Amino acid sequence: MKVIRSFITSIAMFSKIPVPDISPGEDDISYSLAFFPVVGTLIGICIIVLNLDHHLSFIPVAVRIILTLFIPLVITGGIHTDGFMDTSDALGSYLPSERKLEIMKDPHTGSFAVISLLKAYLLHACSVTALLLNPKTNRSVVIIFGLSFVISRCLSALASLYMKKAKTSGMLHMMTKNKKVMIAFAVAIQLVAAAAVSLWLNAVYASVVIVAAVAFTVYYRYKSYKEFGGVTGDTAGWYLTVCEIICALALAATVYAA
């Protein structure tokens, strides 16, 4: 029952998918991070079906590109985009860490957030367009692209668990202060599974995506520690948004160069 409650809590927290209202307790919230990659799996499945199911082949490529970009936003409800924008506002201020953390709590949207979001979505649109319009893009490439949403969430969960927190309060602190080993083990299994399937489909393309995601995770640690003194829920949203774009860019560039 505890596993089911934590699963429902995770879906409720990290997506807009309707689930029963169970009034989650602290344990449910703590364990919910173990199921965070499941939301990425749902996103990946939708993208894979949209672009590979022959029953949907009548949809023009241009429309499928837009829908591919739209799917993560619809399923998550923009929760990670919100963190990305808050973090972008703080980073654009060039103020001390304490003031940056205050800016991230400000409910108002600044110009840096809007500009950064525009750049991010244009870059993501370019990478997805380059990927889906490339005649070299086959079923394996599309599936690896779908699995990148699982890999990025696995790495995000592990980073949230083990990286230093910038604050001793907030949802991220509550989710990660206990039961690290059990949650990390569950996330690691999902990461290994997603990586193994990707490597089995195409070792070169999968390796590039995995290396790009891991490299960005290392950079994320450096950037978060330097700018904020640690990670927060908002920086986690920034990480996931950028990591998804980097994975798409790395995959599109590799397929183009192949």
Image (spheres, grey):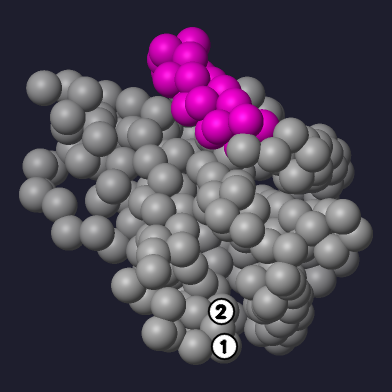
Residue beneath the point at 39% across and 65% down: 53
Spatial CA distance of label 1 from label 2 is 5 Å
Percent from the top left, x then y, of residue 145?
Answer: 60, 54
Instruction: Between residue 200 and residue 93, name the one nearer to us.
Output: 200
Range of magenta residues = 178-200
The amino acid beneath tag 2 is Ile
199 inside magenta stretch: yes
181 inside magenta stretch: yes
Tell me the residue that label 1 is attached to.
Answer: 62
Would you say 229 lies left or right of 177 here?
A: right
Instruction: Between residue 219 and residue 71, name the one nearer to us.
Output: 71
Residue beneath the point at 84% across and 64% down: 256
Percent from the top left, x then y, of residue 214?
Answer: 76, 36
- Name above or below for residue 242 compared with residue 21: below
Magenta highlight: main SS: helix
Q: Quadrant of the N terminus?
A: top left
Tell me the residue that label 2 is attached to.
Answer: 65
Packing grade of label 2 (10 A; few <14, some 14-19, many >=20) is: many
Residue beneath the point at 48% across and 68% down: 51
Instruction: Between residue 56 and residue 211, name the one nearer to us.
Output: 56
Q: Are marks 1 and 2 in contact (CB under 8 Å)?
A: yes
Percent from the top left, x then y, of residue 153?
Answer: 54, 42
The amino acid beneath tag 1 is Ala
The answer to which quarter of the image holds residue 37 is: top left
- Name above or below for residue 219 compared with residue 108: above
Would you say 185 lies left or right of 121 here?
A: left
Examine the rendering and report whether any part of residue 113 can be seen. no
